[in-house]
Image (tube, grey):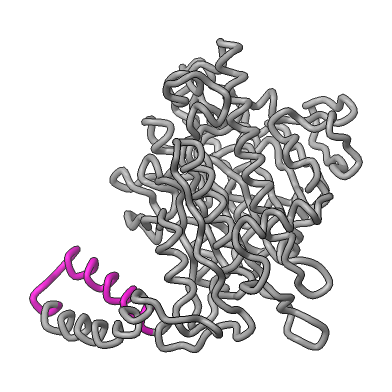
């Protein structure tokens, strides 16, 4: 049944039949499959009580690791049930804290969380204080002539976006599937027929030469921040030139059909673009066009979660603590994202590679900018798909670290929190081939001066 479902998913995306472009790329005697990182980033965290699981009624007083593979559908939480069929390729991590964000300035929770979720760095002039994990990893596992990373969004982003090249340098994602398609599959792919867009791309070399000449003329007249910005732009242009001049990465990959989109209503607009981005992500990774992808999922529409017309953020996310209906709507919200995450994982798992599948050589993480809709930063929900972090486990980490937050008078303040999410990203970075000892800040301090170590890996993931 799972195989049949995968075939239907691929067929719907135009990835079966004569345009099939996802062959088994790694066979006996050929190089080992590259390792990949994919981040599926959502809004508003979760409803923790309906997300967490306590197999066998285990308590919260000590760390534990449970076998996910033995759990029935009914034993999965309401939010995570759409992922049950994939449990052999999942790790659920329960109990982490966004420690660097807790220790940061007091401000809008969404802004702080969005800037700190993937960077683990504290704000600098209101912006993220360092690069996000995808960019850190991409710099180490990049392949010459490929895209270092692919930044995607479904509909758009919120709170400034979660992906940052460096301090104050946010990266705007591409939210148009057709644009992404044209970037990934130019005329250099075997069996492709040139389009008008391809002819424009073929002429870009001369345009890039012009850009370089313009830079050489203008740069001497600039100084300070303006010159830094121009240098960044120049480096990006030169990187594009390198890619344009490189041969097609995978000769056995041919151009698929272009994404099929619809927008008859808000829900179908969102869903069709999400599925298109999942298909393009699968294609990009299978053809080794990039090894790092971020997909920022915009806020869901009310109709997607069975709610009356209105605004999820104001009507339900902020009300979930004291309103049972709002809590159920946000539970539906989380389950909807779980279904979408499952679709992404199924696509990756449908591509044979070596003795396994494409998913087996990926670490695919579902994370959010908050722990929940009432702006807590702990327990921060994390789900990892793939085979690079030993799958089939539910990992619980107790809250026994002092809370560095200055907001000690806030109603939801807790004196202790779980391990720093920095450690998760160190472990994941290492799993995909990056040599990391820390991500973001290496330490923070509580108001009374207690030091909290944020460096090193998350040992529980070993």
Q: Main secondary structure of the magenta part?
A: helix
Q: Is residue 230 magenta?
A: yes
Q: Is residue 427 shown to the viewer in this render? A: no
Q: Is residue 218 shown to the viewer in this render? A: yes
Identify the residue shown where x is 63% and y is 55%: 12
Q: Position of residue 209 (x, y in %)?
A: 24, 87
Along the line of sight, the residue nearer the viewer: 164 or 418: 164
**Which quadrant holds the C terminus?**
bottom right
Task: Report how many numbered discs are placed on residues in the image.
Answer: 0
Q: Which residues are magenta?
A: 219-241
Residue 1 vs 436, above or below: the answer is above
Identify the residue shown where x is 86% and y is 31%: 55
Along the line of sight, the residue nearer the viewer: 402 or 237: 237
Q: Position of residue 317 (x, y in %)?
A: 50, 23
Q: Is residue 27 magenta?
A: no
Q: Is residue 211 left or right of residue 47?
A: left
């Amino acid at each position: 049944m799972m195989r049949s479902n995968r075939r239907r998913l691929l067929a719907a995306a135009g990835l079966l039949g004569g345009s099939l472009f996802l062959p088994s790329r790694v066979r006996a005697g050929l190089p080992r499959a590259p390792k990949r990182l994919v981040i599926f980033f959502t809004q508003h965290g979760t409803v923790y009580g309906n997300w967490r699981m306590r197999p066998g009624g285990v308590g919260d007083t000590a760390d534990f690791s449970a076998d996910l593979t033995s759990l029935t559908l009914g034993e999965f939480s309401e939010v995570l049930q759409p992922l049950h069929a994939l449990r052999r390729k999942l790790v659920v991590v329960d109990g982490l804290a966004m420690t660097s964000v807790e220790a940061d300035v007091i401000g809008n929770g969404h802004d702080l969380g969005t800037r700190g979720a993937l960077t683990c760095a504290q704000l600098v002039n209101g912006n993220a204080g360092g690069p996000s994990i995808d960019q850190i990893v991409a710099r180490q596992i990049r392949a010459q002539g490929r895209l270092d990373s692919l930044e995607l969004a479904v509909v758009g982003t919120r709170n400034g976006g979660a992906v940052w090249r460096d301090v104050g340098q946010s990266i705007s994602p591409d939210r148009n599937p057709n644009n992404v398609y044209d970037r990934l599959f130019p005329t250099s792919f075997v069996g492709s027929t040139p389009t008008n867009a391809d002819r424009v791309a073929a002429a870009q070399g001369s345009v890039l030469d012009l850009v370089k000449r313009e830079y050489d003329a203008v740069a001497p007249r600039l100084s300070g921040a303006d010159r830094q910005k121009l240098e960044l732009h120049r480096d990006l242009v030169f990187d594009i030139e390198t890619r344009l001049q490189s041969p097609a990465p995978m000769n056995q990959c041919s151009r698929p059909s272009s994404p099929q989109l619809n927008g008859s209503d808000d829900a179908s607009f969102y869903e069709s673009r999400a599925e298109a981005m999942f298909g393009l992500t699968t294609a990009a990774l299978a053809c080794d066009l990039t090894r790092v992808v971020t997909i920022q999922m915009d806020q869901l529409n009310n109709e997607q979660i069975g709610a009356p017309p209105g605004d999820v953020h104001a009507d339900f996310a902020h009300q979930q603590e004291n309103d049972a209906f709002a809590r159920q709507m946000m539970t539906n919200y989380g389950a909807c994202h779980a279904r979408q995450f499952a679709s992404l994982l199924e696509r990756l798992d449908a591509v044979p590679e070596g003795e396994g599948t494409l998913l087996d050589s990926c670490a695919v993480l579902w994370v959010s900018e908050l722990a929940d809709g009432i702006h807590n930063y702990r327990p921060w929900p994390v789900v990892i798909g793939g085979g690079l972090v030993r799958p089939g486990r539910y990992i619980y980490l107790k809250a026994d670290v002092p809370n560095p937050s200055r907001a000690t008078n806030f109603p939801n303040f807790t004196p202790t929190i779980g391990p720093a999410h920095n450690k998760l990203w160190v472990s994941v970075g290492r799993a995909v081939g990056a040599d990391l000892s820390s991500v973001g800040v290496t330490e923070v301090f509580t108001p009374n001066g207690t030091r909290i170590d944020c460096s090193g890996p998350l040992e529980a993931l070993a």
